[in-house]
Image (cartoon, helix red, strand yellow):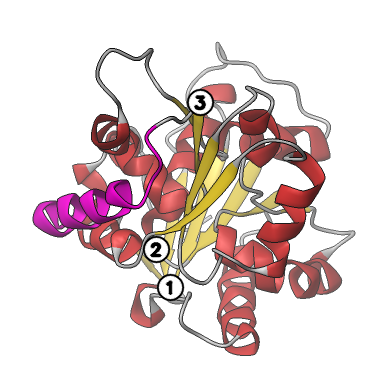
């Protein structure tokens, strides 16, 4: 079984780690585009072209499913990706976990990139799933870039700035960018209010990994014999896992993998 994931950068690590937890025997193909990151400020057409290029590089390794492990790319490029690759290659997008978060009754905040915050796509999800639940959209400029660089100071600054724009009486917080899941504990610490129950954070990695398995008719098997099969593609070229990935637990969990061509 081969699962491919695409993103502009390290945002694909949470979903890759989630796939490995569900199916340790899965071979992973990680195709990102660090030379052209960030994707968010690009026009939808330009972003789509970069996402398709990443997907084509991954598709050369004949995966069974392709995860678009990026909220912004899912907003703008998912229809074009599905038009090119399906039905032969199932394409799974990443949707902010607004539905389960609002089921808590709220209030809910959604942290996302400026490109996703306020988008028609996100507003539609709020309208569909957050009816009657107080929901606040919080743009987090610079946070995904800081996570990509593993810049501790910049991460702290971006989180603090976003926390300052986040209401205090939350019932749940949605991590609407896959990069943010890599620093979830730091985000929780920044928004957690004293004398209140631990704030629930909702990411998408687990649900996306499970959906990928469903699309190919595979069952979770956490006890399967582990695979060390990992292919890393950076802007079209096979390479090693970037050093910045090893700053994060999700990246370190993949370090036993090889990058040998398939």
Task: Write the residue at 74% across / 36% down.
Answer: 132
In the depicted view, which residue is nearer to us: 113 or 164?
A: 164
Task: Write the residue at 14% across / 58% down.
Answer: 151
- Please tell me whether mark 1 or mark 3 is closer to you in this view: 3
Judging by the rendered image, the residue that carries numbered circle 1 is 33
Judging by the rendered image, the residue that carries numbered circle 2 is 9
Instruction: Please report contact status of discs 1 and 2: CB closer than 8 Å, yes or no.
Output: yes
SS at mark 1 in the image: loop
Q: Quadrant of residue 74?
A: bottom right
Task: Write the residue at 21% across / 49% down.
Answer: 160
**Residue farthest to the right?**
87
Q: Position of residue 83 (x, y in %)?
A: 85, 72
Judging by the rendered image, the residue that carries numbered circle 3 is 171
SS at mark 3 in the image: loop
Please determine whether, in this image, residue 3 is positioned above or below residue 118.
Answer: above
Please determine whether, in this image, residue 5 is positioned above or below residue 204.
Answer: below
- Badge number at residue 132: none
Segment colored magenta: 151-168
Q: Residues within 10 Å of mark 3 (few under 14, many from 20)?
A: many
SS at mark 2 in the image: loop
């Amino acid at each position: 079984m081969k699962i491919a994931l695409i993103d502009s950068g390290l945002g694909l690590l949470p979903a890759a780690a989630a796939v490995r937890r569900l199916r340790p025997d899965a071979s992973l193909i990680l195709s990102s585009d660090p030379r052209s990151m960030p994707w968010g400020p690009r026009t939808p057409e330009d972003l789509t072209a970069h996402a398709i290029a990443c997907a084509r590089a991954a598709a050369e390794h004949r995966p069974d499913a392709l995860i678009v492990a990026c909220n912004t790319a899912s907003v703008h490029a998912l229809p074009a990706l599905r038009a090119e690759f399906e039905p032969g290659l199932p394409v799974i997008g990443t949707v902010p976990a607004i539905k389960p978060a609002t089921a808590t009754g709220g209030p809910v905040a959604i942290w996302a990139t400026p490109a996703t915050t306020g988008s028609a796509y996100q507003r539609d999800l709020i309208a569909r799933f957050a009816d009657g639940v107080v929901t606040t959209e919080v743009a987090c400029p610079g946070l995904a870039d800081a996570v990509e660089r593993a810049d501790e100071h910049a991460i702290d600054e971006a989180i603090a700035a976003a926390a300052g724009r986040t209401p205090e009486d939350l019932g749940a917080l949605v991590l609407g960018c896959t990069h943010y899941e890599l620093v979830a504990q730091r985000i929780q610490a920044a928004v957690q209010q004293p004398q209140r129950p631990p704030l629930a954070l909702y990411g998408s990695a687990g649900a996306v990994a499970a959906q990928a398995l469903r699309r190919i008719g595979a069952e979770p098997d956490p006890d399967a014999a582990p695979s060390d099969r990992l292919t890393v593609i950076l802007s079209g070229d096979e390479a090693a896992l970037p050093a910045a990935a090893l700053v994060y637990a999700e990246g370190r969990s993949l370090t036993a993998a090889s990058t040998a061509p398939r």
